[in-house]
């Protein structure tokens, strides 16, 4: 049934994809058309990605496309995308006798980049700043970009098959530190001397929009009357690695920009996954015995996990665990809006994961109001038995004024059973997965983002000595106010100390004899600055 639905649902999209090989090497990829479909080449997780919001699904053959380990027949993810829910004032009318009365009403809307019931995305490649409708004049401009196709200069190895890398470092603000989108004519080191923004062994980037109503399920007239589009610009970057520590992980980083003139109220960001753990030779039956659950033992991880029974041909195939974690969400500032100036400031708490739901295929939701209620439930599902499962995690609510940007990151990990043999879903068997999740989150938050934070501060007047240290440290910093805060965080982002930092005018003295051996972040907060440094503790 699933394959039949998908064949019908994605036929009109798949017919637009030009024929072309999905290369599994590091040779320059050839764009497959306006709707691009490509395979990654780095990481132990082998997957497909489009440039219009669908991830992992092979839309050209109507089959799942997320396999671990690379080169195996063990599928874990059939498809994925995001739902974005918001409340918006729309024009409406009603009859008062023989007269039509115009009025405004607040309507709940949810747009989808992947409908697991049909395999359809409502998104199209491109930028709203160009035009609302899809631009078919240049199939290379909004293709799926891979950093492995690029030279260090950001230029493609094959200049005939695309433009330069689209994300570049500006060095001007926190929000841009992971790279901001640059139009084709400015993608060069003359304009941006710091170079292209590439942070992993294979960065994968695409940008898509919600403004072409022809691709919405239900049709143009129906969706326009409902209040669509929200006029959101999506930027999606996937980070992946080849080294032993991070090869079983990817991180999906999203920027969502409100380009409309409307204030979008009570917004929710909700990644949605079609989880099918099955051997390729037995996909349909093997997809029917999966388990999904929120990881309640350590709620701060914001993690969900999935595993499969081994009674449908999975036994002896080497199946393990899939973990999906929301590792970055907005910090809410004034009027409930995302405050990206505090996004990397450990003195502020992001929204985090607010809802986690899992359900069986026969319970798929199709209506806006039901979807909105679902993603905003503020509840967390445990394991509710085996089935052909979908899962959704959401963060919110927040307001998006015109021009606002909301930023999120989702981490995906894979691990074998810690006890060996077949997976059993117990906490003891998941030790390896949890360790990988913590390590990956540590790397993203305290390497990629901490480096960004440090790059925004004047560190010349801030040193820690000794470093490494065991019981006492001295910080050569002169705060702008007599009383300042000193905070210490472990590498998982947990605050382990907070107290007043009193300077004698030359340095701050801090006792650290309570810290265990490890690496920490020392953060000083005064009335003008938030600065940080890494500290190694050895006992």
Image: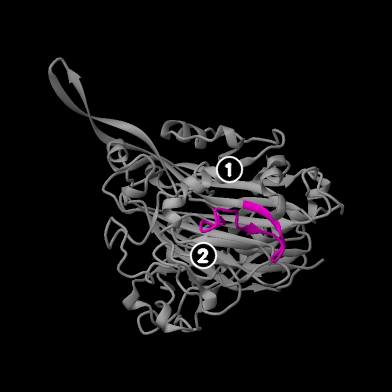
Report the magenta residues as a range. 56-77
For this rendering, which residue is in front, 296 or 429? 429
Circle 2 packing at 10 Å, graded few (<14), some (14-19), many (20+), is: many
Residue furthest left in the image: 98
For the point 73% across and 66% down, the residue is: 472
Give the dominant element type of the magenta stretch: helix, strand or loop.
loop
Q: Can you say which quadrant of the picture contains the C terminus?
A: bottom right
Quadrant of the rendered image containing residue 448: bottom right
Quadrant of the rendered image containing residue 310: top right
Q: Is residue 488 visible?
A: no
Q: Secondary structure at mark 2?
A: loop
Q: Secondary structure at mark 1?
A: helix
Image position of 13 with respect to 509: above or below: above
Q: Position of residue 503 (x, y in %)?
A: 58, 64
Q: Position of residue 520 (x, y in %)?
A: 68, 63
Q: Are marks 1 and 2 in contact (CB under 8 Å)?
A: no
Q: How many numbered badges does the structure rendering display?
A: 2
Is residue 61 inside the magenta stretch?
A: yes
For this rendering, which residue is in front, 80 or 425? 80
Report which residue position mark 2 lands on.
Answer: 479
Q: Can you say which quadrant of the picture contains the N terminus?
A: top right
Image position of 116 with respect to 70: above or below: above
For the point 45% across and 64% down, the residue is: 36
In this picture the colour scheme is one colour
Is residue 464 inside the magenta stretch?
A: no
Image position of 148 with respect to 384: above or below: below
- Residue 2's disc is 1
């Amino acid at each position: 049934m699933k394959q039949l639905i998908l064949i019908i649902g994605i036929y009109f999209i798949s017919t637009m994809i030009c024929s072309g090989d999905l290369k599994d090497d590091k040779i320059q990829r050839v764009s497959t058309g306006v709707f691009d479909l490509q395979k990654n080449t780095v990481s132990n997780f082998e997957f497909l990605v489009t440039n219009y919001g669908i991830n992992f699904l092979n839309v050209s053959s109507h089959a799942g496309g997320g396999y671990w380990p690379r080169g195996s027949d063990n599928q874990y993810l059939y498809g994925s995308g995001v739902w974005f829910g918001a409340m918006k004032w729309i024009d409406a009318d009603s009859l008062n006798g023989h007269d039509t009365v115009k009025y405004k009403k607040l309507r709940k809307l949810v747009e989808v980049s992947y409908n697991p019931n049909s395999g359809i995305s409502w998104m199209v490649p491109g930028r709203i700043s160009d035009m609302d409708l899809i631009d078919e004049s240049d199939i290379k401009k909004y293709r799926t970009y891979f950093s492995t196709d690029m030279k260090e200069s950001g230029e493609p190895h094959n200049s005939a098959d695309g433009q330069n890398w689209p994300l570049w470092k500006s060095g001007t603000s926190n929000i841009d530190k992971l790279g901001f989108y640059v139009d084709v004519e400015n993608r060069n080191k003359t304009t941006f001397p710091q170079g292209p923004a590439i942070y992993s062994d294979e960065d994968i980037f695409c940008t898509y929009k919600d403004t072409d109503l022809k691709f919405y399920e239900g049709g143009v007239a129906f969706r326009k009357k409902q209040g669509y589009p929200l006029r959101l610009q999506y930027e999606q970057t996937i980070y992946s690695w080849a080294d032993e520590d991070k090869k079983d992980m990817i991180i999906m980083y999203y920027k969502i920009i409100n380009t409309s003139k409307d204030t979008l109220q009570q917004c929710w960001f909700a990644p949605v996954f079609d989880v099918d753990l099955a051997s390729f030779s037995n996909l349909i039956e093997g997809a029917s015995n999966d388990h999904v659950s929120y990881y309640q033992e350590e709620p701060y991880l914001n993690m969900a996990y999935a595993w499969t029974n081994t009674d449908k041909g999975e036994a002896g195939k080497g199946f393990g665990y899939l973990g999906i974690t929301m590792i970055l969400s907005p910090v809410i500032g004034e009027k409930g809006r995302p405050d990206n100036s505090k996004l990397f400031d450990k003195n502020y708490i992001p929204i985090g994961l607010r809802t986690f739901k899992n359900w069986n295929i026969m319970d798929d939701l199709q209506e806006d109001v039901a979807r909105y209620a679902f993603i905003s439930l503020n509840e967390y599902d445990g394991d509710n038995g085996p089935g052909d499962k979908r899962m959704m995690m959401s963060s919110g609510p927040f307001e998006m004024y015109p021009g606002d940007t909301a930023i999120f990151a989702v981490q995906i990990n894979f691990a074998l059973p810690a006890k060996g043999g077949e997976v059993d879903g117990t906490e003891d068997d998941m030790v390896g997965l949890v360790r990988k999740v913590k390590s990956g989150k540590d790397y993203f938050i305290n390497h990629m983002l901490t480096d960004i934070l440090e790059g925004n501060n004047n560190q010349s007047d801030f040193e820690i000595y000794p470093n490494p240290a065991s019981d006492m440290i001295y910080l050569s910093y002169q705060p702008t106010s007599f009383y300042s805060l000193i905070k210490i965080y472990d590498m998982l982002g947990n605050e382990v100390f907070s107290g007043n930092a009193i300077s004698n005018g030359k340095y701050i003295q801090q006792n650290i004899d309570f810290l265990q051996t490890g690496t920490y972040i020392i953060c000083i907060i005064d009335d003008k600055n938030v600065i940080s440094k890494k500290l190694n503790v050895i006992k």
